[in-house]
């Protein structure tokens, strides 16, 4: 689990990021979680946006993505979810 201080640090790091993945009308599926998992291994921190036509609300989608990828939900803001997962190979972010 991330502490409040770590989440604040990650939010500031994620501020300038653009969403890489979008959850659309198919919702969260296995293929998407696999790709997001691979992207998290490379980047550690990423934004995912929830489109208006998504059948799932942002909280449900965030939970599903976090559980499926083993990531932490840093923040849900508007229609964007910020996910963090420490990389095994490419560690770039130093947490306080």
Image (cartoon, rainbow, N blue to C red):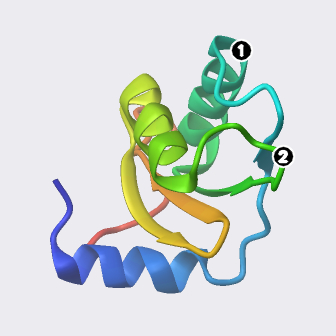
Q: Is residue 51 above or below residue 40?
A: below
Left or right of 65 on screen, residue 80: right
Determine which of the numbered discs, if any, sits on residue 31 in the image: 1
- Location of the C terminus by quadrant is bottom left
47 is higher (above) or lower (below) than 9:
above
**Image-quadrant location for residue 6:** bottom left
Residue 81: percent from left, percent from top: 57, 60
| Earlier residue among tags 2 and 1 | 1
Image x and y of residue 54, in percent: 75, 42
Above-or-below relation of 50 to 2:
above
Secondary structure of the residue carrying tag 1 is: helix
Q: Is residue 96 visible?
A: no
Q: Which residue occupies 46% across, 32% down?
A: 64
Disc 1 crowd, CA 10 A, few/some/many (<14, 14-19, 20+): few
User: In this view, which residue lies farthest toward the top?
Assistant: 30
Task: Tell me how far mark 2 sits from mark 1, CA to CA.
Answer: 19 Å
Q: Nearer the viewer, residue 60 or 1?
A: 60
Q: Is residue 1 visible?
A: yes
> Who's the residue at 79% across and 52% down the image?
20
Q: Residue at x 41, y 45 (%)?
A: 85
Q: Is residue 89 left or right of residue 40?
A: left
Residue 88 place in picture, x, y as percent: 40, 33
Q: Nearer the viewer, mark 2 or mark 1?
A: 2
Q: Which mark is residue 53?
A: 2
Is 45 on the left-hand or right-hand side of 50? Answer: left
Mark count:
2
Asked which secondary structure carries label 2, the reply is: loop
**Is 96 left, or right, of 15 in this rendering?**
left
Relative to 36, residue 81 above or below: below
């Amino acid at each position: 689990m991330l502490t409040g201080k770590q989440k604040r640090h990650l939010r500031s790091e994620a501020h300038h990021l653009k969403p890489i993945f979008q959850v659309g009308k198919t919702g969260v599926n296995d293929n998407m979680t696999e790709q997001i998992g691979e992207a998290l291994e490379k980047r550690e921190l990423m934004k995912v946006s929830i489109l208006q036509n998504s059948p799932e609300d942002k909280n449900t989608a965030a939970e599903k993505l976090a559980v499926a990828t083993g990531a932490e939900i840093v923040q849900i803001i508007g229609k964007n979810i910020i996910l963090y997962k420490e990389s095994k190979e490419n560690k770039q972010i130093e947490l306080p």
